[in-house]
Amino acid sequence: MSDSVPLQPDRLKGLSTPSVFIPETIQPLGASEPRTTQQELRTGRGRYELLAEVAHGGMGIVYRAIDSILHREVAVKVLQERFGPHSDAAIRFVEEARITGRLQHPGIPAVHDLGTLDDGRPFLAMKLIRGHTLDQLVRARQDQDQDRTVLITAFEQICQAIGYAHSEGILHRDLKPANIMVGAFGEVQVMDWGLAKELRRASRGDSRPSATQDREPDHDYPDEGTGTYVGQAGLHTPHTAETMAGSVLGTPAFMPPEQANGAIHRVDRRSDVFGLGGILCTILTGRPTYIATDGESTLQLAASANLRETYARLDTCGAEAELITLCRRCLAAEPDDRPAHAGQVATAVAELRATAEARARSAEIERARYESAAREQRKRQRIQLAFAVAVGLLALGGVAFTWWQERQSSARQAERERNASEKRAAELGLQVEDERRAAVERSRHQRNSDAISFLLVQCETALRADDLEQAEAYVKAAEQRFPEGGAEHLENRGARCRADLELCRALDRIDTMRWMMVDGDWVPIEQFKDEWAKAFADWGLLPGITPLGAFMDRLRDCPIRERVFYSLDIWLVHTRSKELLLFLKTADPNPYRNVVRDAIVEGREGRAKILASQDIGLHQPPRFAAVLGGLIDVPTDRSRLILEAALQKQPSSFGLLMTRASRQFEWNEAAWNDSEIWYRAAIVAKPSNAMAHHNLGLVLTLKKDYVTAISELKTARKLDPRDPNIEKTLTMALTAAGRYQEAVVVYRQMIQKYPELSDAHFGLAVALAGLNDVDGAIESYREVIRLTPNNPRAHNNLGSQLLKKGEVQEAISEYRTAVGLDSSDPILHGNLGSVLTELGDLDEAIEHLETAVCLDPNNPQRQKSLERARQAKIARDATNLKTAPPPREVRPK
């Protein structure tokens, strides 16, 4: 395989005239009059003169045009009149232009201009590309082996272009041979970026709505006379190789299973790798990945990843085994089994081509040696024949003998020279072979080093954006390549990336505990205050122990530098460590921040409040604003101003959003509504964070929106099945919603995992009581009391269940125990007083009911219970007075 093999004219027999291709799924048309008049376009920019329509698609019409300023031919694409200037189609049209314009790569068509017509519809001008699609080239082959080397060279260029797009955070999502243009000299263009998706919009803080985000189309428009349907994403026909509309975007014949199933959250760079595998499959076998009679059947094959027939075609296509293996890897049903991104595929193809070229050169050397040896053999045979004739003619004279001796001497000399020549050739051949092998090894090592360097850069970028999932994927891919050699100088950098990633994960776990709400209150600091020291010690640098110089050297150009300072300041708030204060004041010598830190450590609440009220507090970096805005001493209104000012700079900061959502959580409807808004924003910033879903679920439970609350809590449980607090809140929501049976199931699962967790047994008892399973509830409450004997609520609730069974004395005993354990709870006094009233023990009943009213004077029900007991006592006393015997008359003696 060579680096660049131009397509020869005779290879294009049977193909149509080269198409003009633009970035959208299009239908080529014959030349026709422009549907948009020249005057309309001139009023848009006054620059382009439309010539003829060359293609149209679902959203746009494409014209060949003249750029009147630069005097060159361009392709101009105009949004169709059926779409309004503010429609989703217009948004997607502009987004496609901006995405393609960002991708500055020789393999991606250049966008020259973007404008609007008088009616507000957008248009774009771009490079006019002439050539044939890869699909046309494959169909024109006489057999599968024809032009395979040329097409594999083109495939490598495709992978490089998509690898560049992946490095920019862009997915194509509709890779297929029909979207690849190949010029007459082997130049390649990846077309049709209409379904492209931008991966890292949120991490850059761009809050604009994106048309590249997946969505259901509002409607489809029938394209009269063609039998096709045109939706927002482009032109869609029932043919299996055409792009589909709806919640499933793309082309079924080349679609990965996660995309075919509509699992939008799973579509990533590896989904494009599957599309590259489909293109390679087409090059090797002449057919697409999936083959069926109609689009729906093809989509079913794609959704189920039914690749048996595809693999069978690959195994019998006659291509090199290494190419077939690469193709099968790209077409793996599970994304984790595919190469991580297109750059890895490009590197693999380059290595295969280099190996093939090396084999070809070795074969040429061997062939040359064989031909040289054959020539020498024929030469020796001619000499021997000539010598025999000469000897016959001169056998009778002495001259013949003399001549024979001379010829023998000459032959021996020639033999010696030939042997020396062959030896030099062999030595030269070995030297050439050694040099070739060394060059191949150097080239392989350099490619491996470049790939690892690329992966580590991407990992550091992901770490800066707090995208730990992407960072893990990149550093893992780099670690897998290190054993291949050539990147020893990058090993320390790779180790730092791994250490930074693990530190961020540890800090995330601390934040999860720090922000976790249980029963409407935050988890006590004692449960996590030592975790910071452990996290930084595992990182290899611990403030107060590691010399400041070493720490600062590590933080210099560190991708998680801001995250480190944020966590250190939060650590300071919770521990008030003077050693940590000294470190921060030296490492981050900002006068305002250091004065705030002094106030925190000294516990000067008034001082912190005054400092936060100063104007400079609104201009702090986001990482310190999250600390300042989270201080309990700062008034709520001021805290919100500080946090929202920082969110203007960094709107996708998860820490800022969570602090804003959690700021002085209060037990009222307005506070719950406010928290709900910000917890939802935090989930958008980091949808995989279980704690954000949990806290939102708790807020919604308090708002009695049980359906949504339970959904959020189940999501949290799925993301973190090991946290019992999430399950506890979920069961609380299920119980509050009256879904006792579901609550019982979850509580029993909790008890199976945590048999000594008294809260789980308590919740199970409440749910069983809701199902009127009195015996089951009594058994569970007794288990709670076994685990926590001094739990007054458990004794109280057990007493209530015993009353239902008619075991009155046992119930009163449990009520008395509950009051003895917590004499400040009005509920416990009220329950005991009510039971005693029923039993007629009115004096003690009134005593407990008066205590309950005193503790909770605003409860009308307890006021009524107390009044009823008093009336009962009056009635009893009156009855006793009437039935008493009359007093005896005492007469004086």
Image (cartoon, helix red, strand yellow):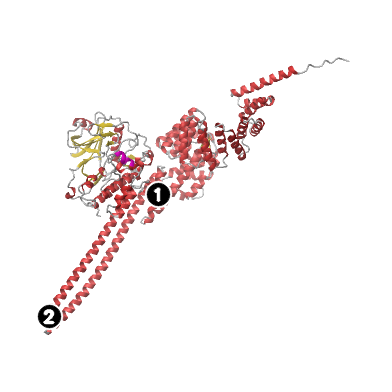
Secondary element at tag 2: helix
Q: How crowded is mark 2: few (under 14 residues within 10 Å), some or many (20 or more)?
A: few
Q: Range of the magenta residues?
A: 295-300
- Answer whether residue 220 is visible to the viewer in this image: yes
Q: Residues within 10 Å of mark 1 (few under 14, many from 20)?
A: many
- Please give the label number shown on residue 392: 2
Q: How many labels does the image show?
A: 2
User: Position of 164 compared to 668: left or right?
Assistant: left
- Quadrant containing the C terminus is top right
Secondary element at tag 1: helix
User: Position of 11 compared to 87: left or right?
Assistant: left
- Quadrant containing the N terminus is bottom left
Q: Quadrant of residue 766?
A: top right
Kindly identify the amino acid type of the residue bearing the numbered disc 2.
Gly
For the residue pair 682 and 181, the one nearer the viewer reads as 181
Give the residue at mark 1: 475
- Answer whether residue 633 is visible to the viewer in this image: no
Q: Which residue is drawn at 17% across and 70% down?
A: 378
Kindly identify the amino acid type of the residue bearing the numbered disc 1.
Val
